[in-house]
Amino acid sequence: MIQTVNSIPAFDNKQQYSTIAAEVSEAVLEVLSSGRYIGGPLVEGLEQQLATYTNVTDCVACNSGTDALYLALRAYNIGAGDEVITTPFTFVATCEVISAVGAKPVFVDIDPATYNLDLQQVAAAVTSNTKAIIPVHLFGQPIDMTALMELAASQNLLVVEDCAQSTGAMWNNQKVGSIGHIGCFSFYPTKNLGGCGDGGAITTSNPEIAARLKLLKNHGQKSQYQYEEIGVNSRLDSIQAAILLIKLRYLDIWNQQRQQIAARYHEFLSHVPDIIIPQELPGGTGVWNQYTIRVQNGKRDLLRNKLQEKGVNTAIYYPYPLHLQPVYQSLGYQPGQLPVVEQVCHEVLSLPMFPELSEEQQQQVIYSIKEVMI
Ligand SMILES: *Cc1c(COP(=O)(O)O)cnc(C)c1O
């Protein structure tokens, strides 16, 4: 019998920081003494490295993943009268930005096996007003980008990839963020490439779009004090760039550690009653920002509470589908309209997942789950 010694967090980044603390401190102190705190060579360096990493020609850093999505829609002139299809099972930012540019979010149901958009439902939701699709590679699992890009091409639609949870993930050996028309990344601290504050980036291989993004993120300023259009302030801090440049060097190793942890969860949880493990599509290489199981027959909250008593902390991403949120009441969705996501929200449970989760800790998680469910 394994004893519950220490409690296991659902997420922890202090341990990771301790492994790179010396490098990070040095880089941060250098920025502080340089006097250059916003933009500059470190931000440009990060943009170049991320473009290379993602295999695109251009990367534009900005202040958050939310801004990345907002700026992407602005750069393609998505606005009033346009419909943008997306998932109701995501962080609110994905659809918030659709409203922010004046367009209308259209929610369609998800595939319960992968938690990503159901592409048949996407195809069925296209109207003459549909301009774009925002797929989310949720929890780090890429959506079928081959099928999605075929659908988008046939309907002449823009594809804005929400890669906030999937930096480094691949579809058919191509990095997400390089397959759609434009890719949006977040460096929020819990993401696979997380900074020590807010940050984001946009990837594109269209130089005109890259130029437009640079304009929009800096007040629409073409040259100093000359403004071409209404923009925003969404510049990235040099300190964040310095930290992210260091962390980018470790990202593949950290993602591999997440993949090992996911493989172990797969192995030990695939035959536990009432538990459904997340499915990976054959062409996808996921990076496991979350490892999210479904707990069936109304047992999710029971399992969660029992795990907590045993010192195993879990999280629920996401407890409510976005189409039924008060903020989207005016869109007129009714309970029961998107049945899969409404069911899945009652079943999902995200298990401890971060690269430094030890095998011992993970065994404790698995053992505790089996103790409750078998
Ligand atoms: C985190 C996240 C965002 C927003 O990123 P921020 O950097 O927090 O603004 C957008 N979409 C998804 C799917 C996310 O997980």
Image (tube, rainbow, N blue to C red):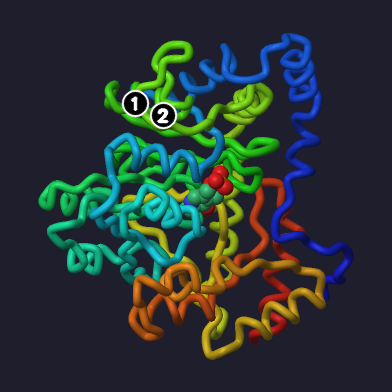
List x then y, in percent, for residue 337: 33, 81
x 60%, y 87%: residue: 299
Residue 169 lies in what quarter of the image?
Answer: top left
Determine whether label 2 and label 1 are within 8 Å by CB.
Answer: yes
List x then y, in percent, for residue 51: 42, 25
The answer to whether residue 271 is visible is no
For the view shown, which residue lies furthest in the bottom direction? Answer: 297
Would the CB of label 1 be found within 8 Å of ligand 1? no
Kind of residue at disc 2 = Leu
Kind of residue at disc 1 = Arg
The residue pinned by badge 2 equals 216
x 42%, y 57%: residue: 95
187, above or below 126, in the image: above
Residue neighbourhood size for the residue with mark 1, other residues' Cα within 10 Å, grouped as few (<14), some (14–19), many (≥20): some
Quarter occupied by the C terminus: bottom right
In what element is the residue under mark 1?
helix
Camera-nearest residue between 117 and 326: 326
List x then y, in percent, for residue 40: 57, 13
- Which of the labelled discs sits on residue 212, or is there none? 1
Residue 76 lies in what quarter of the image?
Answer: top left
Q: Distance of mark 2 from mark 1, alpha carbons? A: 6 Å
x 80%, y 36%: residue: 18
Camera-nearest residue between 324 and 306: 324
